[in-house]
Amino acid sequence: MEHIGVIGSGTWGTAVAVLLANNGHQVTLWSAIPAEIEEIKTTRRHKNLPETVIPDSVVCTADLKKTAEGKDMLVMAVPSVFVRSTAARLRPYYKEGQVIVDLAKGIEEDTLKTMSQIILEEIPEATVAVLSGPSHAEEVSRGMPTTCVAGARKKAVAEYVQSAFMSPVFRVYTSPDVLGIEIGAALKNVVALAAGTADGLGCGDNTKAALITRGMAEISRLGTAMGGKYQTFTGLTGIGDLIVTCASMHSRNRRAGILIGKGHTMEEAMKEVQMVVEGVYSAKAALALSRKYNVPMPIVEQVNAVLFDGKPAREALDDLMLRDRRIENSDLPWEE
């Protein structure tokens, strides 16, 4: 049995707390909002996961010190925009040897850093791992079969995370490609906004398949240019996570995109979804990275134009379809 602090009581943090408690670990669940954690403590439910009962063994608290002290593992489950500030708050309570597992998916807009890089900036002595993959909280919390990847630079750390999370309904693989995992996790949210926007415009399955496929081409080009491994983008944290985020109504990014496709502004869509839409925060960073590494990313460009420049969604889709002719894969030879 491990002693684990889950930092963040959103749907994903709560689902993970339930999973870890059911695996036999002693779990403490933290929220920065006292009223939110008090409601969870009293009802043993999260308002956005109404079918899931939180085990009585899960300790609920708004005390970050209590959440961190004496723990073997700390799971960072706050939205990406709050990772830096939360890590800074955590630093006084972190003890060397504790493994911090980041669940947040995003790129910091100002610095273009991944979540694990941010945590290490704020807590330089930390041992950091990531857990990512096609894993909607709504399904994980109900025990539906799910697979993810635990990424860490050291094999022993990845295997430690794997052993803590692994269960009959939650299969975990390991990988040393932390950067590739994080790039795939962050950028798939941007493509999911595009896929949702196409749905809102009334497009069909053909359009969605095209956006998923060409979106993955953009993500893998950028990811490998940054140092990630191509195999990562063909796996669970690449194409796997992209498929589920673009196709499922559990996806807040897709839902926001649908609203944008129907004519809502970005601000209106985020307000109606009522949860953090990570793709909105990652879109500008993705565009900046594409320019920094000189990697063409036309879908990312059009998403930014719709979100921040007021470009009509239908016009953005038309511009994608009317781009200059291209060869799909320049590495394949032609017959002479």
Image (spheres, rainbow, N blue to C red):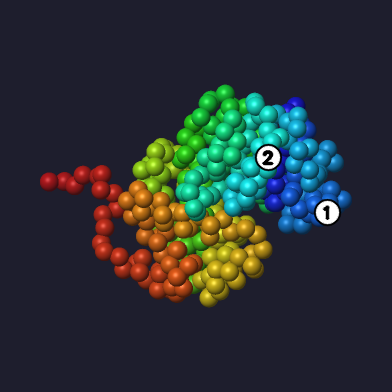
- Amino acid found under the numbered disc labelled 2: Leu
- Distance between the alpha carbons at the discs numbered 2 and 1: 23 Å
Q: Residues within 10 Å of mark 1 (few under 14, many from 20)?
A: some
Q: Is disc 2 in contact with disc 1, using a CB cutoff of under 8 Å?
A: no
Is residue 144 visible in the rendered image? The answer is no
Q: Give coordinates of residue 132: x percent, y percent.
A: 56, 42
Q: What residue sits 74% from the left and 54% below the top?
A: 49
Amino acid type shown at disc 1: Glu
Residue at mark 1: 39
Furthest-front residue in view?
A: 92
Q: Report the side of 68 relative to 154 (left or right).
A: right
Residue drawn at the location 63% of the way across and 35% of the way down: 100
Location of residue 283 with respect to 135 vertically, above or below: below
Residue 251 location, x and y as percent?
59, 57
Please count the marks in the image. Answer: 2
Front residue (pair 206, 331): 331
Residue 47 location (% of width, % of height): 77, 57
Choose top left, top right, bottom left or bottom right for residue 168: top right
SS type, badge 1:
helix
Residue beneath the point at 78% across and 43% down: 63
Q: The N terminus lies in which quarter of the figure?
A: top right
- Of 111 and 141, which appears nearest the observer? 111
Marked residue nearer the N-terminal end (2 or 1)? 1
Whole-percent x, y for residue 253 in the image:
56, 59
- Which mark, by number, is residue 90? 2
Q: Work out whether residue 284 can be spotted.
A: yes
Q: Residue at x 64, y 68 (%)?
A: 272
